[in-house]
Image (spheres, helix red, strand yellow):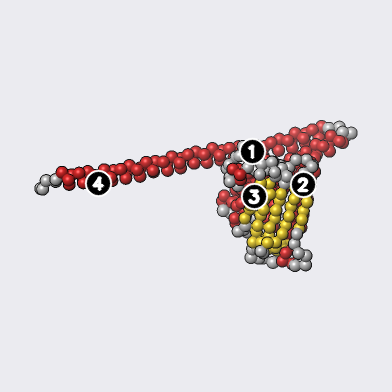
């Protein structure tokens, strides 16, 4: 067996040292990646737990209010009509918000399970938006805000008035935007709703004069498991869930959503939707068709 020279030994040691250094670096990099993944898993679990806690409160609290108010009505004297009407109004408000939260929760659950698909009909967009605004009239009146709806399309063209899309999904998307706009507006302010056609896309803009959204918050506003310290995406009353549902539904319909906002200057959400291939012969006027196939979910 030949004896290695000093030069050969140095070269061998150098090669092994380089290989060891490379392996050590790879192990350090892998360790860093594992730490990042572990941190994200911990954050995800914490956020999901927080999310469930908030959703639970959004269901339990309205139910408690409805039960308490109903009990007070039953024990009220017949002549106390003003008090009774006031309590009935509060019951309606709580029930309306509860129903709205349930819609988002059920859709979010179906999205997670991959059980939501487009159900395309020929939709009367003007009637659908009118129907959404009408459903929020009482909430808007309670907040002392008003709507300004501009359906700015060229009259006389059927394709513009009737647009092939999923009416229930579009109704929920619009409802979430209107709901947010009301909740973050101050008394006396106006919510602008504009509908137009741009390059064969249906464009819906909902603009409020409320608190606005910071640039940092805009980056995570559609994440259903994120809670922002301030701004429209707070899980208070389910805003974060509604916006995340909107994003998921728009992705399904090949649509987009943009935000124009600055803190203290209000917020504008702009939805753009391409026309879908018509699946069945049918019309939708206010988007009131049943969204869920399994009625037992309700």
Which tag, 1 or 4, sits closer to the chain's start? 4
Res 230 label: 1
- Residue closest to the eye, 83 or 209: 209
Instruction: Answer yes or no: is residue 62 visible.
Output: yes
Res 190 label: 2
Res 259 label: 3
Estimate the spatial distance between the alpha carbons at disc 2 and disc 4, rounded to whole Å: 73 Å
User: Image quadrant of residue 288?
Assistant: bottom right
Which tag, 1 or 3, sits closer to the chain's start? 1
User: Image quadrant of residue 291?
Assistant: bottom right
- Residue closest to the eye, 225 or 207: 207
Direction from residue 130 to residue 108 in the image, left or right: left
Q: Secondary structure at mark 3?
A: strand
- Residue closest to the eye, 221 or 103: 221
Q: Position of residue 186 (x, y in %)?
A: 75, 40
Q: Which residue is mark 4?
A: 15
């Amino acid at each position: 067996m030949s004896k290695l020279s000093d030069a050969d030994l140095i070269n061998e040691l150098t090669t092994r040292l380089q290989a060891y250094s490379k392996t050590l670096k790879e192990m350090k990099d892998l360790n860093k990646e594992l730490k990042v993944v572990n941190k994200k898993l911990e954050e995800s679990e914490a956020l999901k737990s927080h999310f469930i806690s908030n959703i639970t409160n959004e269901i339990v609290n309205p139910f408690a209010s409805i039960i308490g108010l109903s009990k007070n009505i039953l024990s009220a004297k017949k002549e106390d009509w003003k008090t009774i009407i006031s309590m009935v109004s509060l019951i309606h408000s709580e029930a309306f918000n509860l129903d709205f939260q349930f819609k988002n929760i059920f859709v979010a659950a179906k999205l997670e399970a991959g059980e939501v698909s487009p159900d395309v009909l020929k939709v009367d967009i003007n009637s659908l938006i009118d129907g959404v605004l009408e459903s929020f009239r009482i909430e808007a009146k309670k907040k002392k805000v008003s709507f300004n709806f501009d359906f700015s399309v060229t009259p006389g063209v059927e394709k513009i008035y009737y647009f092939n899309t999923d009416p229930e999904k579009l109704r929920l998307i619009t409802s979430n935007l209107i709901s947010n706009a009301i909740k973050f507006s101050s008394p006396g302010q106006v919510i602008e709703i504009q509908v137009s056609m741009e390059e064969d896309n249906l464009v819906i803009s909902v603009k409020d004069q409320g608190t606005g959204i910071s640039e940092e918050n805009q980056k995570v506003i559609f994440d259903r498991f994120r809670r922002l310290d301030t701004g429209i995406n707070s899980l208070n009353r389910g805003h974060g869930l509604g916006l995340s549902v909107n994003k998921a539904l728009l992705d399904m319909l090949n649509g987009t959503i943009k935000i124009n906002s600055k803190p203290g200057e209000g917020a504008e959400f702009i939805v753009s939707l391409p026309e879908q291939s018509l699946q069945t012969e049918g019309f939708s006027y206010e988007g009131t068709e049943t969204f869920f196939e399994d009625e037992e979910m309700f």
